[in-house]
Image (spheres, rainbow, N blue to C red):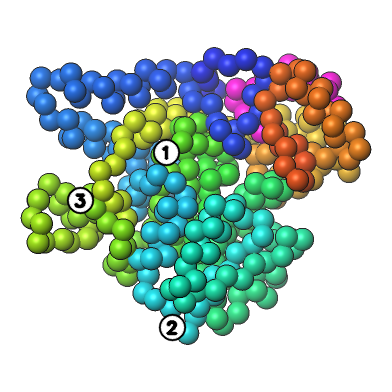
Amino acid sequence: MNPFVAHEGIYMLSHSVGLPGVGAEQAASNAFWQPWQRADGDIWTHWLSEVEAFRQQLAVLLNTEMANICPQTSLSSAVSKIIYSLPKPRERRVILLSEEDFPSIAFALQKTTHLGYQLKFIPEDTDTSDLTHWDQQMSDDVAMVLVTHVQSNNGRQLPVQQITELARDKGILSLVDVAQSAAIIPIDLQQWQADFVVGSSVKWIGGGPGAAFLWIKLEMIDQCQPDNVGWFSHQNPFEFDIHHFRYATDALRFWGGTPSVYPYALATNSLAHINTVGVESIRENNIALSNSIIQAIPASVLISPRAVSERGGTLILNFGQYQPKVISQLNECQVHFDARAKGIRLSPHSCNTMAQIDRLISCF
């Protein structure tokens, strides 16, 4: 499996900030600094090749074409750009999402009310893995549905392809968040046929913050006219005609002004390792380690789904009255984890050994 940068303790935070692969720092440093040191002086050509490599590796990971991918600084920024690129709503004015979705995206969507949109939330206690609930919520006034592939609070994996098919049949646009699933669960965007997908490299990809991305279905590109543009949204960024702007013909129309480079160089290194090892292999290891933990705890402790097909890479555990004691013992064992309202979050990954899992279990 992919070796990771040196770290102390038992690292279980890939759902929050994933570990980069060994050599990532050197690879990113070379990609960022060396162009300044070259004799040819063509710095932007070298830097843009690094961003292109990021898009290429993502395309492999997600089974899609590079032209459909646009680098972004964050998910919330990507979501805002998507919404503001669409024609203003007329008859359909509702954006459907769940109370289990990540707040940052919801915050961005809340700021679209002056465009005429209204938000409708699927209640927190709803089983969003059940397609029936989505069918009931997708009323005639819904313009777009946000689908979080893996929900961070409960570790639940949603049937994205079924939900996007249902939305398409009802004339509803679909926006999928893969921040908690990219690089830990195999994703095939060709099968999903969503309209938009947003994700980040900071979690399971292990690419650090700042290297997020936006994916758009080919058929949707010409329908979208982003208003937050810059010279890298232009069909020819180096044309430099101040009176003549043309949208890029692919997803890069969502890019904007002068981009950062270093985050994408860092993320590219991690993505290359992941694509070499294969997400299927990474997922199998995650399942094996997770199942060892599940088998060692009472059934009532597990908050995330027990069935592999219904859970993401993260286990959410709640020991009830013993929760503070377990947290204290995990800290003593130098386990890197976090806790939310529903429980302790643990993300077994390729950086973990079975010996570490056994030590973690001894803390329960």
Label 3 sits on what residue type? Answer: Trp
Tell me the distance, in whole angstroms, between the alpha carbons under discs 1 and 2: 35 Å
Q: In which quarter of the image is residue 227?
A: bottom left
- Image quarter (top left, top right, bottom left or bottom right) of the C terminus: top right
Question: Mark 1 packing: few (<14 Cα in 10 Å), some, or many (20+)?
Answer: many
**Left or right of 300, for residue 59:** left
Relative to the observer, which residue lies in front, 189 or 99? 99
Q: Give the residue drawn at x 67%, y 66%.
A: 122
Q: Distance between the residues labelled 1 and 3?
A: 19 Å
**Mark 3 lies on residue:** 231
* 229 magenta-colored: no
Observer-nearest of 299 and 17: 17
Q: Is residue 131 above or below residue 64?
A: below
* Residue 26 rendering spot, x and y as whole percentages: 37, 17
- Amino acid carrying label 2: it is Arg
x and y percentages locating residue 289 in the rendered image: 71, 29
**Marking on residue 210:** 1
Residue 172 in the image: above or below residue 98: below
Q: Mark 2 points at which residue?
A: 90
Pick whichever of labels 1 and 2 is earlier in the sequence.
2
Q: What element carries label 2?
A: loop
Quadrant of image for the N terminus? top right
Magenta highlight on residue 349: yes
Kindly state the secondary structure of the residue where label 3 is placed: helix
Give, as a single range, the part of the protein colored magenta: 347-364
Q: Which amino acid does label 1 sit on?
A: Gly
Question: Is residue 302 in sight in this rendering?
Answer: yes
x and y, in percent, of residue 267 in the image: 41, 32
Q: How far apart are marks 3 and 2 (CA)?
A: 31 Å
Residue at x 35%, y 45% (from the top left corner):
71
Residue 349: x and y, percent? 62, 29
Q: In the rendered image, which quarter is residue 127 located in? A: bottom right
